Amino acid sequence: MTLPRGYTKTEWEKYVRKGRKLINQKSGIQFALGDLVVDALEGHTRGHGEVGEVVELLAHQIGANASTLREYYYVACQWPAEKRRDDVCWSVHARLAAVRSRYVLIRKDPLDPITGEHRWTVNEAERVAHRRPDTPTNKEERLAHTRRLLHNDEDAAAAVTEMLGRPEVRSRLVSDQHARHLLREAQYEHWRQVDREMEAEVELAPVEDAEEVEETAAETAAPALRYQEAPLEILRLIGSFASFFVSLQRIIPEIHAQDYNEETKAAVLDNVHKARMLLDWCESAITTGRTDMDKALASLLEDEEGE
């Protein structure tokens, strides 16, 4: 038997025995009230309207809730006296009332995973009836219970944030490759959304004239350049660099090299090599005026386009 902290086995068993005795007494009363309705209807028409009328009037006149009395009546009908077990509570009989093989099932006590005893509990009856147990007893049931409670995204996010305050939870999370992958995807999608929103704001912003656009660009660029006089291709080139710098500053901190295989790393390093060659080409074009690319770069770009 499972004991709560601070109790001896002898002390706790005394309360359990007393509680079970009270439950048995309550179960007897519940069955007796259900049998009372059965007896009241004996020899009378049992159409839906007649049953409802008898239950409601009887409940009102004896001081009971009509819905509760109707449930007692239903369970009593499903469990004739000779099929009931006096040592199994009414609530278990109620959970099994719609199970076809209930008369056979009730004879054998299932294992209670909480206490380790073989006895009928409401939890085990709910499992047999293919209903959600009130008290989850294994990982699958606990997770299902948590999902039902946290079906709202806002609540789920708040719960996850709170759980991340626990060092053991953080440790398990970062050691799970799938979890890390999901977090990186979420970060990537977040920044993509930020970029889309920024682009939308730029497109929708009212622009009075071209000078205002140039002045705005000048504020965020190198001060040595006179943007009012700069050629369009130079402005576009500097804008591409700025976008490239911002993207890398966001993405690089998300890298987790320990999660990548050699093939993945090689693919990234190959692109780093290509980027260096393109930057060298750009530098050469600006310093020498020659815009033709060397054979190695041309071959590299041809391979890229052919993939």
Image (cartoon, rainbow, N blue to C red):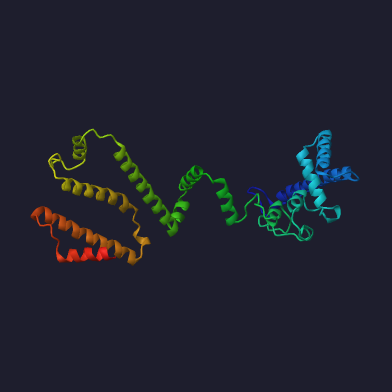
How far across and down, in percent of the image, does residue 305 sit? 26, 63
Residue farthest to the right, as pictured: 43
Give the image quarter of residue 210. top left
Q: 282 or 86: which is nearer to us?
A: 282
How far across and down, in percent of the image, does residue 296 sit? 17, 66
Q: 58 or 135: which is nearer to us?
A: 58
Residue farthest to the front, as pictured: 209
How far across and down, in percent of the image, does residue 128 sit? 70, 57
| Res. 176 visible in picture | no
Q: Would you say 171 lies left or right of 12 here? A: left
How far across and down, in percent of the image, does residue 261 sit? 35, 65
Q: Would you say 42 lies left or right of 207 here? A: right
Q: 99 or 206: which is nearer to us?
A: 206
Residue farthest to the left, as pictured: 288
Q: Quadrant of the N terminus?
A: bottom right
Number of marks present in the image shown: 0
Residue drawn where x is 27% and y is 62% of the image: 269
Residue drawn where x is 36% and y is 62% of the image: 260
Q: Would you say 211 lies left or right of 28 here? A: left
Residue drawn where x is 23% and y is 33% of the image: 208
| Res. 46 visible in picture | yes
Q: Quadrant of the C terminus?
A: bottom left
